[in-house]
Amino acid sequence: MTSNHPIIQERTERTQWFLQDRFGMFIHWGLYAIPARGEWVRSVERISVEDYQTYYDEFDPVRYDPKAWARAAKQAGMKYAVLTAKHHDGFCLFDSALTEYKSTNTRAGRDLVREFIEAFRAEGLKVGLYYSLIDWHHEDYPAYGDRIHPMRDNENYTRNPETFDRYLQYMHGQVRELLTNYGKLDVMWFDFSYDRMKGETWKATELMAMIRSLQPHIIVDNRLDASGEEGGTIFTKNPLSYSGDFASPEQIIPPQGVTDDEGNSLPWEACITLNNNWGYAAQDFQYKSSTTLIRKLIECVSKNGNLLLNVGPNALGEIPKESLDILAEIGNWVQKNGDSIYGCGQAYLPKPEWGRYTQKGNLLYAHLFEESVGPINLNGLAGKVKKARLLSDGSELFLSRPWNAAQYPDDAFISFARPEHSSYPLPDQRATVVELELL
């Protein structure tokens, strides 16, 4: 159902490419790659600015090659990428005129954001920047008494609330720099609203007006308006101007997808880590398998969503080999089966027992995760399927009614070989995709 609400109409226009592309790369990278205990290390370990300074002094990612990152993303089948231009620790990977706390002043001496954008654009990928609304380095950001600031228990870091406006000027100014100095951006990914630190605390109406004036096409997530725990007014029929263009569930794939309070599908993107950390964690080897991630990508698309899959490069600027190997495996599958992902969305049928459906027009894609005893049942599709083929190689599959299916007149059946009632292993154990052309 289309809405006459202007914010919803504009959101629909802006997100058309997003709902086509479906798969992106998230990149969490910064000073925290040196301690290598995750991107929240300053908060978790209550590290002072002075003690954290050692990582700034050491930062020199001599193996940073964004062209290699871009190739890895493209080969994985990703269509866009989002890099942390500034995370919560306040360190900027870009050459901001508003701070000295930036990569160009480190041993690196480089504008790492500019290099990222140029490399990914050169591979034909859309580019986005993550920007943390909070800042543990800035002297005007609330510290003592804040719930998550590294110095939350240290009375020496008591702030004057009247100076918070100086921080807002700084934050808005940096967003303006990002939207002015790097050409066309496709995504602005804000993080991190919490407690009272959301909405107009950020002067969000003013901030979003600036964003729309500078780059009206850019899509923005919903975290100006909402914390990670809840979604904000994007879920309502009267979204605020800063409600964002897509919802951003984190480390979870919503059971029923994401809809507004009237049941209309919303643009959404699940952001998921490859292991258990966003930033590089040297001792975290709990990587998800490529099969799991392929199936989670399928699950997102089957619920009208996107997958933003994270990598955490190390202190030298390298994406870990374990991550690259997983991305290559995903890319191997996507290269053969991408037609069932790009431009696809939720099917009109309920989830089947053996896997999931995605759909694009009259093409229904059956993603088979489980082997069948006998032919594969397509519940409710009797007389509705014109052709069936294996998507990975285009080979014909057998669409016929086996002798033992007389009691299931409403169902269609497909088989990989003859005789049709026999059982055969799935051609691809990760996810076998059958393209069904519907009548």
Image (tube, rainbow, N blue to C red):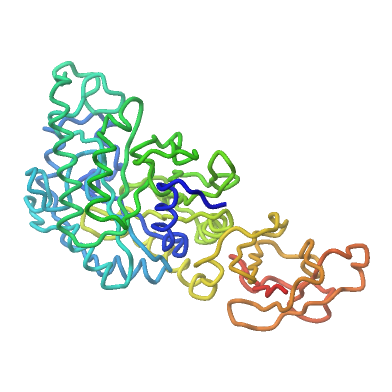
On screen, 325 above or below 56? Answer: below
On screen, 187 above or below 337? Answer: above
Total numbered labels placed on residues in the image: 0
Of the pair 136 and 257, the residue shown nearer to us:
257
For image coordinates 12% across by 38% down, the residue present is: 53
Whole-percent x, y for residue 199 in the image: 32, 33
Image side of residue 183 versus residue 262, left or right: left
Whole-percent x, y for residue 30 in the image: 22, 48
Whole-percent x, y for residue 104 in the image: 9, 53
Q: Quadrant of residue 435?
A: bottom right
Of the pair 186 and 84, the residue shown nearer to us:
186
On screen, 384 above or below 156? Answer: below
For image coordinates 86% across by 74% down, the residue present is: 401
On screen, 160 above or below 136? Answer: above
Q: Quadrant of residue 382?
A: bottom right
Whole-percent x, y for residue 117 in the image: 23, 63
For image coordinates 30% across by 42% down, the residue present is: 37
Instruction: Name, please, the residue furthest toward the front.
Output: 4
Image side of residue 49 versus residue 195, left or right: left
Image quarter in which the C terminus is found: bottom right
Image side of residue 72 versus residue 102, left or right: right
For image coordinates 58% across by 41% down, the residue present is: 262
